[in-house]
Image (tube, coloured by chain):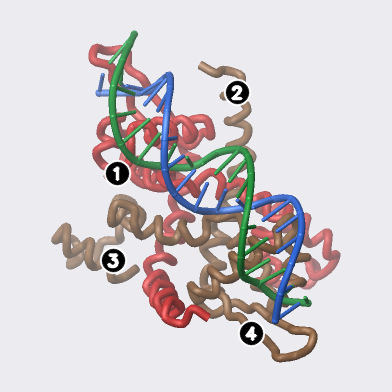
Chain colours: A red, B brown, C green, D blue
DNA sequence: CCGCATCCTGGAGGATACTG
DNA sequence: CAGTATCCTCCAGGATGCGG
């Protein structure tokens, strides 16, 4: 984050010396930087149907495959497996297989995975505050299709 | 958010009177609540390819259609129009058409739209901090496909 | 300048059945 | 228990062309 802020300020060339707080204008560069590559990189990871749900569920502690399957209503085995594989590959979830009979596999968040929780909660908070208003607006616009 | 916190605490039945800070366990209920319907509602809105980019661009001030098109590299006219219509319907963006020749149309964020910026920045910050680590992990797992 | 209509493609994700 | 394999559907989103 800091590197990006510095890079941007170098680009614009001023203001650093004045000790100004970053303006909103500068802040949104975090989103718009690289033509959106940075924000897209994270959206690509979490914007599927299940990732955030799995991460939030694992935040309570390690869980086995079946426990996850039960605690996340509506997910198919296929998508649970797939999403867990992606999360594992990205280093957000650690998979531990115990050589037992019957087999036991536990999934747990890595520190990186845990670090995703706060921004996700920020988003969830925003949703809870504003989604009702959004759906009201949406309902209105259905009535006036022009 | 507060309603949901209260609702959850009512559900679990305790702790309110003890003045305890919400635990992480309780927090993630914001994400997992409704079997993920709440978080899904917002992901459905912002997790397309362009929404956040448009919102972040408009945060600097109202812009005309063509200006947006230029400032968001890679977006097609179709997707710009579509996404703007969605944002307008959801009450995140206000569209103002001036009856001039040639036509002039300006798009600006509504207060609701502006309120999306902070959580989006939280996410962007997370991305900038962790995406390098994620991509390193991803590269590793390519080498050991097992 | 601002956009809508149309056609087309890739990939996310569901359903179902099978396996070590 | 913890997956894999296969098939299928749906739609986001790109390309292109026309219209007020």
Say what secondary structure mark 2 lies in: helix
CA gap between label 3 and label 2 equals 42 Å
Q: Are marks 1 and 4 on the same chain?
A: no
Tell me the subunit letter for badge 4: B
Q: Position of residue B141 (x, y in %)?
A: 57, 24
Say what secondary structure mark 4 lies in: strand
Q: Which residue is mark 4?
A: B96
Q: Position of residue D1 (x, y in %)?
A: 25, 23
Residue B80 visible within the image: yes
Mark 2 or mark 1, whichever is nearer to me: 1
Mark 2 or mark 4, whichever is nearer to me: 4
Residue furthest out toward the right: A13
Q: Are marks 4 and 3 on the same chain?
A: yes
Of A56 and D8, nearer the camera is D8
Q: Which mark is residue B4?
A: 3
- Give the mark, 4 or 3, whose residue is nearer the N terminus: 3
Tell me the subunit letter for badge 1: A
CA gap between label 2 and label 1 equals 30 Å
Of A82 and B29, nearer the camera is A82
CA gap between label 1 and label 4 equals 42 Å
Q: Position of residue B146 (x, y in %)?
A: 50, 16
Query: Which class describes the residues within 10 Å of circle 3: few (<14), some (14-19), or many (20+)?
Result: some
Marks 4,3: beta carbons within 8 A: no
Query: Which class describes the residues within 10 Å of circle 1: few (<14), some (14-19), or many (20+)?
Result: few
* Quadrant position of residue B31: bottom left
Mark 3 or mark 2, whichever is nearer to me: 2
Q: Which residue is mark 2?
A: B142
Left or right of B37, for residue B118: right
Q: Are marks 3 and 2 on the same chain?
A: yes
Q: Which mark is residue A8?
A: none
Q: Which residue is mark 1?
A: A74
């Amino acid at each position: 984050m800091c590197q990006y802020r510095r890079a941007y300020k170098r680009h614009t060339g001023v203001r650093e010396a004045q000790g100004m707080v970053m303006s909103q204008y500068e802040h949104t560069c975090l989103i718009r930087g690289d033509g959106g590559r940075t924000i897209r990189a994270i959206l690509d990871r979490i914007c599927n149907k299940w990732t955030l749900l799995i991460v939030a569920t694992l935040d309570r502690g390690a869980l086995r495959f079946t426990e996850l399957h039960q605690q996340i209503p509506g997910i198919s085995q296929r998508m649970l497996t797939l999403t867990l594989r992606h999360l594992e590959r990205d280093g957000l979830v650690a998979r531990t297989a115990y050589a037992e009979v019957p087999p036991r596999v536990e999934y747990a968040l890595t520190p990186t995975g845990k670090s995703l929780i706060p921004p996700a909660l920020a988003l969830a908070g925003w949703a809870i505050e504003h989604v009702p208003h959004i759906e009201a607006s949406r309902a209105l616009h259905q009535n006036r299709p022009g």
